[in-house]
Amino acid sequence: MADLRTRYLGLELANPVVPSASTLSSRIDTLKRLQDAGAAAVVMQSLFEEQIEHEEIEIDRMLEAGTNSFPEAITYVPELEDYNIGPDAYVRHLEQTKEELEIPVIGSLNGASKGGWVRHAKLIRDAGADALELNIYYVAADPNLTSAEVEQRYIDLVAAVRSSVEIPLAVKVGPFFSSMANMARRLVEAGADGLVLFNRFLQPDIDLETLGVDPTLHLSTSEELRLPLRWIAILRGRVDASLAATTGVHTWEDAMKLILAGADATMMASALFKHGPEHVRTVVDGIRTWLDEHEYASVEQAKGSVSQAACPDPVAFERANYMRALVSFTSPYDWRIAPSEPKA
Ligand SMILES: Cc1cc2nc3c(=O)[nH]c(=O)nc-3n(C[C@H](O)[C@H](O)[C@H](O)COP(=O)(O)O)c2cc1C
């Protein structure tokens, strides 16, 4: 039987299937179900910058009691009451998770500005996290901000967290950089041990009746796999870091493709919400069966065998593929197809 072990962020995982950061980690019983189903590690739901800011504003407010110098605190409070989990509760939940689970537990911080992260990275380390995932979720909407400034912001954040904790550090980012490969390399140079590709940005919709902005979250589908698949394949061997894929991993076939492209870990959220924690088992079993049937001895042997560097047709991952794909698509509107004769 194929050996499913993989190394991710310097950790030895039993297989490459890891539930990604989500509310699935908010209850210990769900986490245990994920572990029992074969999850090799788990990424905890993030501690969000907004939660950290809220706590810091509260502290400032206590210090400045009686003044009204922090009006933003007043607007934050009602929104965050529903969260019911601040940094302290987050750390306690992480400690308990570490006590109850045997698999590696990866803490997660989510935000885009510098404040508070370093301190909270240390708290997550002290709670026993085996690694930390830093999710830089930033929509660069300010026209005055150049791409170089935005990129520097990412690098500064990674460097600040890197210098504060020594546990393995993964950085989760979106795909919207002018030069993704260069950015990946710089994130690694700034101290990332691994990259998690890619963040799935919420795309707000407009409600035509209320004219309100509808931020409802829609779960992903396997169709979204191709973006991380391409970039894992391109980056494999080009950056000196672990690679994890997130967005669109639903089936064992999805996970297997990513391993062939070069992923060290394949992460899932939407599929687990759709099918339940036990779906992990189907994915792990599917990977094992495919490897056995195709005579691969291990995940390590299969890993990266269809990366861009290993592929007989490397341009297939770049622009050349684009024209070929367009040309191979035929439709009744195509000039290559003679219009049908008008019926008599
Ligand atoms: C309900 C829900 C909660 C999530 N919470 C977090 C989070 O706390 N931190 C984070 O980095 N990503 C979070 N994500 C994003 C997922 O980790 C994942 O990157 C994204 O959903 C794409 O993967 P998928 O196609 O498997 O869903 C969340 C996703 C969902 C659906």
Image: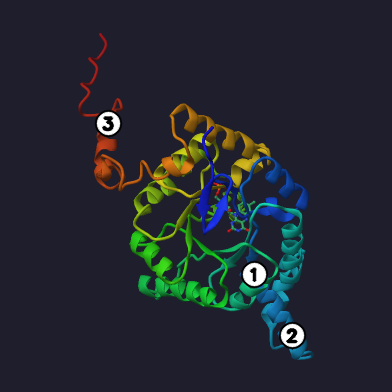
Nearer-N-terminus badge (2/3): 2
Nearer-N-terminus badge (3/1): 1
Residue 78 seen by the camera: yes
Mark 3 and mark 2 in contact (Cβ < 8 Å)?
A: no
Question: Which element is circle 2 on?
Answer: helix
Which residue: 22% across, 15% down? 341
Quarter of the N terminus within the rendering: top right
Residue 61 image label: 2
Residue under pointer 1 = 125
Q: How far apart are marks 2 and 3 (CA)?
A: 63 Å
Density class for disc 1 (Cα within 10 Å; few <14, some 14-19, many ≥20) is many
Marks 3 and 1: which is nearer the front? 1
76 on left or right of 293: right
Question: Which element is circle 1 on?
Answer: helix
User: Disc 3 residue type?
Assistant: Ser
Taking 292 as reference, is 28 above or below it?
below
Q: Distance between the residues labelled 3 and 1?
A: 51 Å
- Count of labels in the image: 3
